[in-house]
Structures are given as C-alpha cells and as structure tokens.
Amino acid sequence: MSLTSFIKEPDVRKKFSETFPLPKIDLKAEMKAPPITKNYSLVGTAFDYLLRFYIKRHNPSAKTSKWVAEIALSCIGDDNLKTKLTNTVNDSKLIYQKYIEDGTLTNDVLRIAILLAKIDPIYRASYIDPNINIVDEGDIKDLRNLINLVDKNSFTAKEICLLNPTFGKASGLVGGADADIVLDNQIIDMKTTKFLKLKEQDFHQLIGYYILSLIGGIDGSDDDLEIKTISIYFCRHGIFLPLMVPSSNSLMIQISDVRFKEFVKWFVERAPHKI
C-alpha cells in the first residue's frame, strides 16, 4: 500500500471528505502545452524526472533521493532484461550528469527521462512495458514544451530544496510515501493533467503529505522545518495553486486546531502499518 492507495480506501476517503471538504476554487488559465500523444501517464512520470533534473541544475545544493528506476532494477527476475535496463540507467546517469554540469537540455536528456519513466512501473506495479526501450518522438516534443513553461525563479530555493523526499518513519505508516518537491517551507505536487481543476483525491493527498511531515519530519531537512504551504503545479498551464496548511487556519482549509489534532490521531490509528 502507499499513501495514494490508503486515501482511496472507502472509510478513509469518507473521513477525509468530512474533515477536509474540497474548497471551491475557480481556476482559469490557458493550457499552453497540450498533450501531443496519448501517453498521458508516461509523460507525467517522465516530466517528474525532467523537472527534478532541471531543479537540481538550478539548485546545486538540492538533496536528491535514488531514482525509482534504480530501485526497480532489483525487482527484475529476467537476467537479460535486468542487464539491458541496468545499462539504460547507467547511461542515463552519464547524460544526467553532463546536463547538470553544462545546462544544455538536449533531446538525449528528454529521452532518458522517458526511458526512466518506463522502468518505474516495474517497481510500482510489477508491470513491464513490452516497448520499454522505444521512445515516441511526440513525447520528447511534449516534454520540451512542458519544460519551456517552467519559471526558474519559482523553483529556486532560498535555503531548502528536496527532490522526492520521504517522511522519516511516518512513510512506513502507509507502506511508502514520497513528495515530488519540497522547496523551503512548501510541499509541491506536480500534475500534468490537461484539466485545470483541483480534484478531491489530489487535495487529500497533499494534506496526507503534510500530516506525514508532522509525524515523521521530512528526510533531508532539519527537524525544525515548518511546512506552511501545500501546492499543486499544473505543468501544462504553467501555474501554481497554493493551499495553506490546516494549522494556518486559512480560508482554503477551515478546520480548528483541536479537530485537526483529532484527525491526525485517527490517521495514525487507522494507517495500515505501525511505527
């Protein structure tokens, strides 16, 4: 199980919905990078990789975790496939390092983001793509359009930049959880959807990340890091949707401190694992 799976459980979803009703937010913006292929999920994962490459390039002190594609290698039973994909990951590391050093965003950089994204499902879903070494040129163009929308200043940290951080012992409560980005006092989740809309599941997942950070901290950060904002970055529109955390008593998430503490206690007790 993972945080995503946990919040899909019927009773958990009901509890989240009752405690954190979806705020009514009217978002309007032009979709500047519409999908080119129908490989929606693949491009989303590939852009996760690509944006983290980009952020690391512009935040040299950013702390990174091991790629999921690297972890996936240990899940492969077929020796020939394992060798082939190990070579893919090793080649990707060389291309990635060259990009970090010179900042030239070549098609090779975009290509490895896609190849790494194709390996991820081996770990996450025990699925092997029959075309795991084939890259659609349309997906490369799509990634180029998406990265061109990124405002460097919006992803430049003042002090703290964590890429794919986990939440200490709290990640174990739900069988694993990692955020996309932590930038200073903000947790950012990336969405490559073409629909500019705050979905209930995404909203609750962000709150789940925040709760895990309160319980277990955020790996790679100081113990006193205080998250003040949880945000979604809509990649195809190039805009942020910031939501203040529950403890700030913002208009986005209206809940008393007492009720929030009660929810956190319930969350820990209901979680599938103990810490």
Image (cartoon, helix red, strand yellow):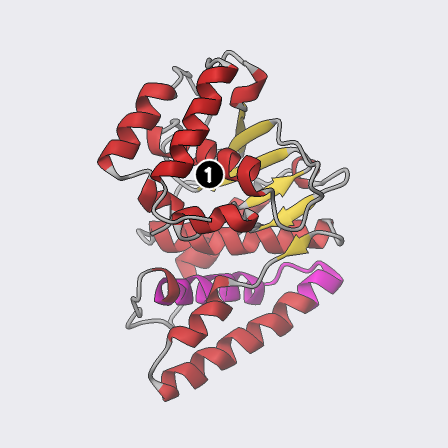
What residue is shown with label 1?
236
Say whether residue 9 is magenta: no
The answer to whether residue 48 is seen in the rendering is yes
The answer to whether residue 235 is seen in the rendering is no
The part of the image, by quadrant, that contains residue 15 is top left
The outermost residue toward the bottom is 80
Q: Residue at x 37, y 77 (%)?
A: 76
The part of the image, by quadrant, that contains residue 216 is top right
Classify residue 163 as left or right of residue 134: right
Q: Residue at x 37, y 20 (%)?
A: 19
Badge 1 amino acid: Arg
Between residue 106 and residue 133, name the one nearer to us.
Answer: 133
* Magenta span: chief secondary structure: helix
Return the x and y of residue 114 as percentages of the image width and height: 45, 62
- The local secondary structure at tag 1 comes to loop
The outermost residue toward the left is 10
10 Å crowding of disc 1: few (<14), some (14-19), many (20+): many
| Magenta stretch bounds | 98-122
Q: Residue at x 70, y 54 (%)?
A: 57
Classify residue 165 as left or right of residue 28: right
Return the x and y of residue 138 as percentages of the image width and height: 40, 57
Q: Is residue 270 above or below residue 62?
A: above
